[in-house]
Image (cartoon, rainbow, N blue to C red):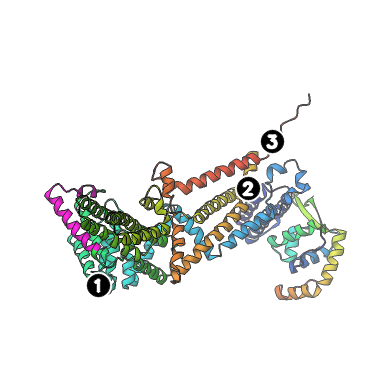
Amino acid sequence: MRFEHTVNRWSRRLLGFFVRDLPLELKPWGEAMLAEMPQVRGVFAPVSWAIGGSIVLSKSLIRRWFSGKAESSTVASSGTAGANSPAPLPRLALAMLLLCFAMLLLPSFRQGLRTSLESWNPLWTPHGQLEFERLLDQSEKLGDPESLAFVALNTNDPGKAFRLAKSAVERNPQLEWIWYSLIQGQFYFVKPAIDLHSPEVVATIQRLQQADPENSVPYLLEAERIRWSELDSPHPFSSIQQPTTAEERQLWQAWRATMERAYAAPRCDSYFNRRMQLERSVLLKLKQERPLAFLNQMYWLAIPQWSNNKQYSDLLLQEGDNALRAGDPNKAAESYWQVARFAERMRAQASSTYERWFAAGFQRESYQKLSALMAQTRQDQEKARIDQTLAALQQEHAKLDDPRGFWVMIYYGPVSTVGIVVSVAAAVAVLALALTILGMGYFLTRQWLRFPALPLLDSLLTKAARFSPFALAASCVVLYFTYLPYASLYASYMNGTLRPEEGEKLRAFMEIRYLPDRVITLLGGVEGLRICFWAAITAVLTLVVIAFLWRWAPRKARPVSTS
Amino acid sequence: MPDEIRVSPQTLNVLVALLHAPADWRYGYDLSRETSLKSGTLYPILMRLAERDWLETRWEHADDTGKPRHVYRLTAQGRRAARETLEANRARLAEWNVAYRKGAAYAI
C-alpha cells in the first residue's frame, strides 16, 4: 500500500512537471489529468496514466507551436499568456524542416554536404581519421597487391609504407611504379619522413629505373633525391649551381648526369593515371565514397616535379646564351633544343593540366630563345615554324601571359566559383541548423525548466526558430543543385566514363578545399588562415543574421506620458 | 468550429460512454475505465470533442476528497451529433469491439 502510494506520488510529480508551465489553453487539460491521479489505483496504472498524459501534453504543445494556434484570441486575451507562450512557428517552417530531412535521402546531397564540411578542415571531423584508419585496415586485410599498394601510398607511417609496398610489388611486379609515388611524396615535405640517404631508397630508385628505363621520371626522381639527400636545406639548389667544394662539385656532376639521362629519355610518364586508377579500383572494391580525399590526390599528384626541371632547364638555357655570346650558335641551339624536346615530350604525354602548363612553360622559354637564335642565324623557315608553335602555345595557355609570369600558376590555381557556392551553402546550412536547434531548444526547455522570460531573447530566438528553417531549406537546395554536377562527374570518374576535359571541372571543385592561395596572398600570406577561412565565413554570417534579427526584433513599448 | 470529427473506434467508444447517461457529468478516470482507454488516448479525444463544442467541461469539487476534478458531458449539439455518428458507424464499432475488446461491445 505504501509502495503504491509512493508510485502514485512520483507519477504525479512526473505529470506535474509537464503541466507546470503549459500555456493557458492547454493547462486545464493538464490539470484535469493531474486531478484524476489520486483516483488511479495500483502500481502500474498511475505510471501509465502519467506517461500517457505527459505524451499527450507534449504532442499538443509541439503541434500548437507549429500550427500557430497560440495567436488565437483565447490566449492573447490572457494577461500572462504572452510571457508563458512562445510565438508559434508557421506550418511552412515545419514543411521546410521536413524538406531538409527528406533531402538527406538524396545520396548526392549527403555527399555534397559531407565533402563540403570535410573540406573546411580535416581536424573538424574527428571521425575522419578513424574512418581512414579503418579503411586502411580493411585494405590490408584484403591482402591483394592493389590493396597493399593503396595502404602503402596512403599511410603516414613510412616504415609500414615501405614494408607494404615491397610486399605489393613482390606479388605484382607491374606495381613497381608505386615506389615513385612513395618516394616522390616525400619531397612535398620540408623534412622528408624517410632517410633519402639510405641504401634501401637508393636501391629502390635504381630498380625503378631498370624497370622503366625509357621513362624520364625515375631519373628525375633520382636527381631530386641527390639534391635533397645531400643538401639538408629546403632550398638546396641555390648552392649547387656554383659548386665550391670538391664534395659539392661531385654532387653537381652526379645530378647533372642524371638530369641528362632524364632529358634524353623518350617517354615522360609521371604515373599519375596509374595512381588514380589504383585509388579508384581499391575504393570501388572497398565500396568507399571519399570524393574529397580522391580529389585531394588528384590535385597534389597532378603537380609534377618542378624545381628540379626548372633548375636544369635554366642551366641549359644559360649555357646556350653563353655559347651564343662566345660565337657558337650551334652549341647554343643544341642546349635550347634539349629543353625544347623534353618540354615537347612532357606536354604531349602529360596526364594533368598542371603537367601541360609546366611543359608549356619550358617549351615557351626554350622556343623564345630558339626563335631569337633562328632570326640571328637567318633560318627564316625554321623561325616561322617555331613562331607558329609559340602562337599556338599562347592561345592554348592564355594564362602564360599573366604579367607575374608562368610560375604564378603554381601558386595561384584557378578556383571554381560554383565550388565556392557549394561551400558557402554548406556553411549557411550549418548556421541555419544551429539557429533552428537553438531557437526550438530554448522554447522547449523554457516550457519545462521554468526560468524567467527574457523578452528580447524570446524575440530573437523566436525569429531564429521561425526563419532559420527557410534559410536551412534554401541553403540545402542550393548546395544540392550546385554540387550535383560534381557528384555526377565523380560518379563518372569512379565508373571510368569521365572524359578528360570533364576531369578539370572535377579538380576545380577540390581547389576550394582550403582558402585559395590568391586570398592567402592578399591577406598577407598568413598560412593559418587556410584552416579558419570557412569558419570565419560562418561566424560573419552568424553576426549578420543576429544583426538582422536584432534590427527586426520588436521593441518593448515605452509608457506614454499622460501629464 | 467544424462539425466533422475523426471517427476512430476509440472516439466512437467515448461517445457511447458519454451517451449512457447524457445528463450526468463524468470524470476522466471513470471514462478511461469504462472505455478501457489509456489517458494518452482518451484525453486527445476529449480535447477534440471540446474544441468542436460537442463536449462541455467544468471543474467540480469531488465529494470524497474535496479536491477539484474536471468533469465532462455532451452538449445538446454533441448529443445529436454523437447519435448520428454512432448510427452511421454502428457496424464499424461492433466489428472493432469484437476484434479488439473480446466481445465486450457496448449497446448503442
- Going from N to C along the chain, the mark reached first, 2 or 1, is 1
Q: Is residue A183 above or below residue B67?
A: below
Image quadrant containing the C terminus of chain A? top right
Disc 2: host chain: A
Between A280 and B92, which is closer to the camera in this rendering?
Answer: A280
Disc 3: host chain: A
- State the image coordinates of residue A366 (x, y, percent, origin top left): 30, 56
Q: Residues within 10 Å of mark 1 (few under 14, many from 20)?
A: few
Q: Residue at the spot x=79%, y=50% of the render?
A: B60
- State the image coordinates of residue A149 (x, y, percent, origin top left): 31, 68
Please tell me whether mark 2 or mark 1 is closer to you in this view.
Answer: 1
Q: Is residue A78 above or below residue A124?
A: above
Q: Which residues are magenta?
A: A237-263
Q: Is the residue under label 3 in contact with that under label 2 (CB below 8 Å)?
A: no
Q: Residues within 10 Å of mark 2 (few under 14, many from 20)?
A: many
- Going from N to C along the chain, the mark reached first, 2 or 3, is 2
- Going from N to C along the chain, the mark reached first, 3 or 1, is 1
* Residue behind mark 2: A443
Q: Residue at the spot x=50%, y=66% of the render?
A: A488
- The amino acid sitting under disc 2 is Phe
Q: Look at the image and tell me whether residue B108 can be seen.
A: no
The answer to whether A152 appears left or right of A555 in the picture is left
> On residue A556, which mark appears?
3
> What is the spatial separation of the Cα atoms under label 2 and label 3, in whole angstroms?
20 Å
Magenta stretch: dominant secondary structure: helix
- State the image coordinates of residue A449 (x, y, percent, origin top left): 61, 46
Q: Quadrant of residue B27?
A: bottom right
* Residue behind mark 1: A170
- The amino acid sitting under disc 1 is Glu
- State the image coordinates of residue A30 (x, y, percent, origin top left): 70, 52
Q: Secondary structure at mark 3?
A: loop
> What is the spatial separation of the Cα atoms under label 2 and label 1, in whole angstroms?
65 Å
